[in-house]
Image: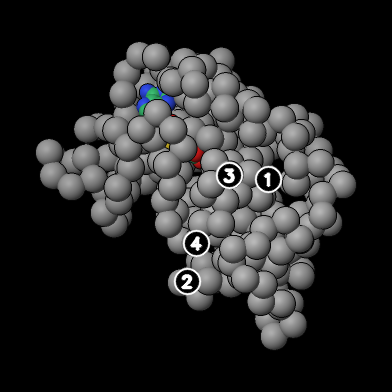
Amino acid sequence: MKTPEAARRPGFPLRLKPDTGMLSAGKNMADGGGFTSPKSLNGDRNKLQKPPLTGLGQDSHAIRARMVDKLAAQGLADPQVLAAMGLVERHRFVDTGLGNQAYEDTSLPIGLGQTISKPNVVARMLELLMRGQSGKLGRVLEIGTGCGYQAALLGQLATEVYSIERLRGLHDKARENLRPFRLPNVHLLFCDGMLGYAKGAPYAAIISAAGGESIPAAWVDQLAIGGRLVAPTQLAGGAQLLVVVDKTAQGVRQTVLEAVHFVPLKSGTN
Ligand code: SAH
């Protein structure tokens, strides 16, 4: 290969933005802007307050810290992923009536028959995407913006995020949900994600929140050499399984992991 692999990796050098801590919707919120430093997430757990799970606002910071503790107890260990999950306010992405369930390990409806995955599954997929690397990912493609929650997390983990949604109603909702977080590196696109997004390629990572019967060829084409793709896929008409695709100079390696339950990947827009 003529081009060294490192030089072909996307995202380097891309403009690196300083961490602003702007993960909360506005600075004047009662919960102190929702900022939790990664350090404090790993701090003395006994010092965590235990607010009732029904109360958000003032308590949402501590509730998220408790969610992160649970994720860590379940074996999730990537410090960047856990820090992002401690920062992004999940309750702002679900209907107000569901806000008090936002930090439970449960999937929730987000409208138009779609769901936001439970935190454990979101963290697991992001951890697979990160592969334990200490720095940020380069450019990332997300298929299935939904309410925008995972896009906000990816905004912390990658230098640039392209997130595609095929349902206009959800694309608009995600735009509204994400606006107050002011994440200039997260780009929302209304189109058919089955085709990927060639203009942003090659991607260091591709993640799908919807599962098809196979992994679209466009995704693998748009993945950088050295890049990784994580997607739920219904293999051979059986159960939906989490599939990881690693693209190397030698070819493509597919790893099949545990069973998952994601909404179907559909073509076209609506
Ligand atoms: N990551 C999202 C989860 C959304 S659920 C979140 O954090 O909220 C999966 C989403 O994938 C749905 O909104 C669904 O409309 C979308 N989807 C399904 N097929 C798609 C396609 N071909 N292109 C783009 N989005 C698609």
Please, what secondary structure does the residue beneath circle 4 have? loop
Which of label 4 and label 1 is nearer to you? 4
* Residue type (three-letter) at the residue carrying disc 4: Glu
Q: Which mark is residue 75?
A: 2
Q: Quadrant of residue 178?
A: top right
Please, what secondary structure does the residue beneath circle 3 have? helix
Q: Is residue 251 visible?
A: no
Where residue 62 sits in the image (x, y, percent)? 69, 67
Badge 3 crowding class, 10 Å Cα cut-off, few under 14, some 14 to 19, many 20 or more, is few
Residue under label 3: 96
Q: Image point 51% across, 57% down: which residue?
A: 101
The CA distance from mark 1 to mark 2 is: 21 Å
* Residue type (three-letter) at the residue carrying disc 3: Thr
Where residue 70 sits in the image (x, y, percent)? 53, 71
Return the residue found at the far bottom.
46
Q: Quadrant of the C terminus?
A: top left
Badge 4 crowding class, 10 Å Cα cut-off, few under 14, some 14 to 19, many 20 or more, is some
CB atoms of marks 3 and 4 within 8 Å: no
Please, what secondary structure does the residue beneath circle 2 have? loop
Sequence-earlier tag: 3 or 4 = 3
The CA distance from mark 2 to mark 4 is: 17 Å
Where residue 81 sits in the image (x, y, percent)? 60, 56
Q: Nearer the viewer, residue 246 or 186?
A: 186
The CA distance from mark 3 to mark 1 is: 24 Å
Which of label 3 and label 4 is nearer to you? 3
Please, what secondary structure does the residue beneath circle 1 have? helix
Q: Image point 36% across, 33% down: which residue?
A: 113
Badge 1 crowding class, 10 Å Cα cut-off, few under 14, some 14 to 19, many 20 or more, is many
Q: Image point 51% across, 49% down: which residue?
A: 98
